[in-house]
Structure formats: structure tokens, C-alpha cells
Amino acid sequence: MNKKIFILIFVIVALSSCRNGTKNSAFQKSSRFETVLITDTLPIINLSREVLPINLIYPTDMVAIDTFLVVLQHHEEKIIKVFSMNSYKFLGEFLRKGGGPNEVIVFGRVSQWFIEEGEPKIMIQSYPNYLAVLNIRKSIEAGETVYDRKYTFEKGQKKNLFLASNSVYEINQSELMMTKDPLRSGITDNCNFFWEFYDCKTDDVKRNIVYENFTGMIDPFLKESNRLLKPDRKKAALLYSKINLIGIVDLEQASIKQIYPGGKIFNVQTELEIDNRKSYFDEGECTDQYIFALSSKGVKVSEKVNIEAAPISQLDVFDWNGNYIYKVDLGERIRIISVDNNQRYLYAVNTDDAIIRYDLSALK
């Protein structure tokens, strides 16, 4: 399974017309992308929920995998805390900040996780040193960070690629997917590349996905988005923060679907003007079946600063074909979500730092 990571990226959005298609949506096809207009009106679903007896000060990230609930606190000396999803018992903590071989210097949110040979694992990216696969069970047993494998970026082309990237994903053990981030790195050459697929054996970029693969517009604009890698590593989703838009990317075909949940295409530059700026998708999660988008429902950014006035969070659920499947009222102001690998529960952290478990059985 895989994790979202909140980033700043340059992306270009298509401003193109559409024609009527299926009953629920309208499609416009080209050789590289489709525009999908969501016209359905879905009933609102309420999920049963319970507050878990886990008390932590300001959790900054969370991963529900196998039988483990992994909670991160980036401000603590040991960043990762692990709890049992069955008993909520505290199982251990690890991943120290520092310059040691298994310590992290700059570490954001977990961008990818998965079950490998029966073992739950998460990807740890310590910028600018390494990318590593952390074995959760072995780390709990050892009482310290245990990596099954590590990618270092000390020399060769990979050093420059890693320095210019925001997040890096493991497609397989010989291929990494790197994301250009000129804002963070200050490296502006070849900014047109969005994802670069790096071959670890040959120290070479074998293919890339450029902005023109996404749309026909010429000028890029600054965009906040949440990026999700499908567990099978064949597709990715982009949830945009300041515009009501979702992109679904076929990584093998370098094609994209632009999903407009509001049912109409809009002028992006107008949406991003200070007076009009709104908040849409704050957070994301995905499984092989669904894309879970945590929505602020288009509240104005200026109003969202006041937490008490912020709207109750909504969960919009899509499939990987771009169909709008469920609309869920979460009944809380939520800032972090994670779905377990069996899609039985959604775990969330609200604005009061309470950890809540939602029963997803109504979505099946």
C-alpha cells in the first residue's frame, strides 16, 4: 500500500470542452488525456465511529497496515510509534532524528507502504541521504530502526536526480520513480519533467512523464496537490488542494484523466486568485479499489484559518476509472486519514488530536 505526501508541484490543467458520454459523466478523449465531468448527485453516507484510547500530542502522519497502526510525531526524538489495531496496545517506537546510518535528517510524511513476503513495510526518505524500506515487525522486535534495503544517492546521476526531487517511490527493486520539485530544491533545469523513472542498475533515466502528457496548456502554474500511488504501482492520483480537480495518471501509458467533481470545467487562474481561493482536497488515501479524498467542500481559505468555523470534513470516494462512488459525512473536522489494507476501517486524526476509527462496511 502507499501513502500520500503533501507537496508543492508545477502542473498544467486542461481547459478544454467536453461532449456527453456515459450516463453519469461526460468525457472528452484525446491521445493523451480525458476530461471527466462528474454530474451525479450522491446521497450522503454516515459511518459508525469510535474514538480510540490512544493519546498522543499532535500526530503528524499515520499508516494503517496489516495489524499495525503506525503513528508519526515528527517533533519527538523517536518519530514512529506503533500500536496494535486489535488491542490498541503500544508496541514500540523507533526512527530517530540525526546523522546516523539509520537516522533521518529531513523526513516528511510516509509516501508508500506495502506488504512484502508477508511483512508490512513502509518507505522512509531521509533527504538528501537515502531512501529505505523499513520492516515494521523487525523494528518492533529490535527496539530500533531496521531496514530491509536502502538506496543511497551519494554519487552519479542519481545524486542530482534525488536532490531535484520531492518524493521518490519504489516501482520495483531496480526502478525508482522520482518527482521533480524546483520549489524545494531550487533546481530549475528540465522542470518540464514531472516523474522520472530511474534504473538503479544502469544509473540512468529510462523514461519520464512530462507536463505536456497531461494537458495542452503551455504555461505551468504553482499548485498544491496530494499525490497517491496505487498499490499495484501502475497508476497515481493527484488531489488538488486549491482547485476542485482530481487527476488519475496511468504511469505505463503516460496518460491522464482530469476529473471535475463540480461537473464543469473552470478557469484555473481565476480560481487561484487571492479573493477566490478555496480549499478542496486536504488529504488522500488509496487502495487497489478506491481513491479516498478528504474534502473541505470548497470553503474559502481565509475562513478555514479559524478551525472552529471550518466545515465538517467530507470523504469523497472514487474508483480508478474516475467514477464518483460514495460521499461520506465524517462528522468531525479531520486532518489526517489512513485506510487499512483490507478496507475494513478508516483511521483519522481530528483537529483535537483524537484518533478515530470509522467502520467502512457501508461502502462495500
Image (cartoon, rainbow, N blue to C red):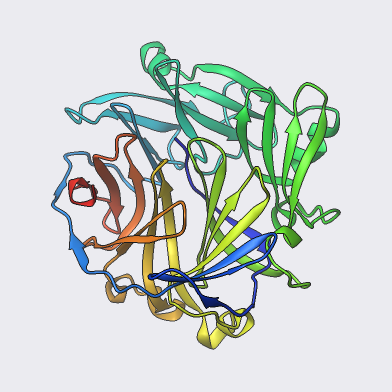
Tell me which residue sits at (58%, 79%) in the image: 272
Res. 19 image quadrant: bottom right
Where, quadrant-wise, is the N terminus in this rendering? top left
Q: Please provide percent x and percent y for residue 243.
A: 52, 73
Query: Nearest the camera: 20 or 300?
Result: 20
Seen as rendered, the residue at the extreme bottom is 275
Q: Please provide percent x and percent y for residue 78.
A: 43, 30
Res. 65 image quadrant: top left
Q: Is residue 227 left or right of residue 77?
A: right
Q: Is residue 272 left or right of residue 195?
A: left
301 in relation to 100, above or below: below
344 in relation to 221, above or below: above
Q: Please provide percent x and percent y for residue 37.
A: 48, 73
Tell me which residue sits at (53%, 88%) in the image: 275
Q: Please provide percent x and percent y for residue 188.
A: 82, 56
Query: Nearest the camera: 111 or 184?
Result: 111
